[in-house]
Every structure is written in C-alpha cells, then in structure tokens.
Amino acid sequence: MKSEAELQRELGYYRTIFKNSGDALLILKNREFVDCNYAALKMLGYENKKYFLDSKPEDLSPPLQPDGRDSHIKAQEIMDLAVKNGSYRFVWTHRRADG
C-alpha cells in the first residue's frame, strides 16, 4: 500500500502532465465540463477557464458532424460509451468560442 506522501507525489505528477500537455484535454462529469487544460482553451478560443467551464458540450459543436450525423445525438452516444467503458477515444469537430 502506498503512503499518503507517495500518493500526493503521483497526483502532482499527473496534474503536471494534464496541465502541460500539448493535446487539448477536457474532463466531463455527469455530461458537464469540470476541467480542461490550457491547450483546450487555446484550441477552442476561450481566454478564460471559467467561461469555458460555464459552457456545455453542445455549445462546442456545429449542428452536424462531418459524417452528416446530428452533433447532439452523436455526442450522447459517445458519452454513453465513455460511461460504459470508463473512457472512449474519438475524433470530433468542434466550434470555437467565436463561432
């Protein structure tokens, strides 16, 4: 069993990776954004994390995805898969904050 100090050290390591990743990382809980890194803010055109966290996943999507599917319906299916499997990796077309 790991000590509290070891767990805190590991947590700090993962927080650093999350924060400094060049890939946009978004964390959702109950289908709402709870965190994101700087790369996500930059990619999506948000100047401030608070404004991003006040948005909803559907605010970041055009009406249709490139495959012609309704973004809202497809997002629900993907989120259901993520909940079922614990995670789910996918490609998505987003809409930046400025439209």
Image (spheres, rainbow, N blue to C red):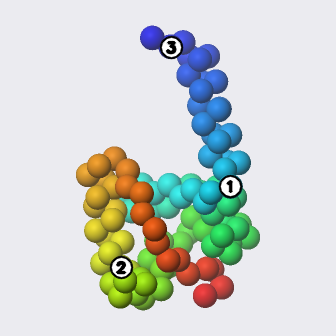
Q: Which residue is mark 3?
A: 2
Q: Residue at x 70, y 68 (%)?
A: 42
Q: Which mark is residue 94?
A: none
Measure the C-alpha gap from mark 2 to mark 1: 27 Å
Tag 3: Cα neighbours inside 10 Å, few (<14), some, or many (≥20)?
A: few
Q: Is residue 42 left or right of residue 1?
A: right
Q: Is residue 61 left or right of residue 88?
A: right
| Helix, strand or loop at mark 1 | loop
Res. 54 image quadrant: bottom right
Mark nearer the viewer, 2 or 1? 1
Say whether residue 50 is visible: no
Q: Which residue is mark 1?
A: 22
Residue 78 placement (x, y as % from top left): 33, 65
Q: Amino acid at mark 1?
A: Gly
Res. 9 image quadrant: top right
Q: Amino acid at mark 3?
A: Lys
Q: Which mark is residue 72?
A: 2
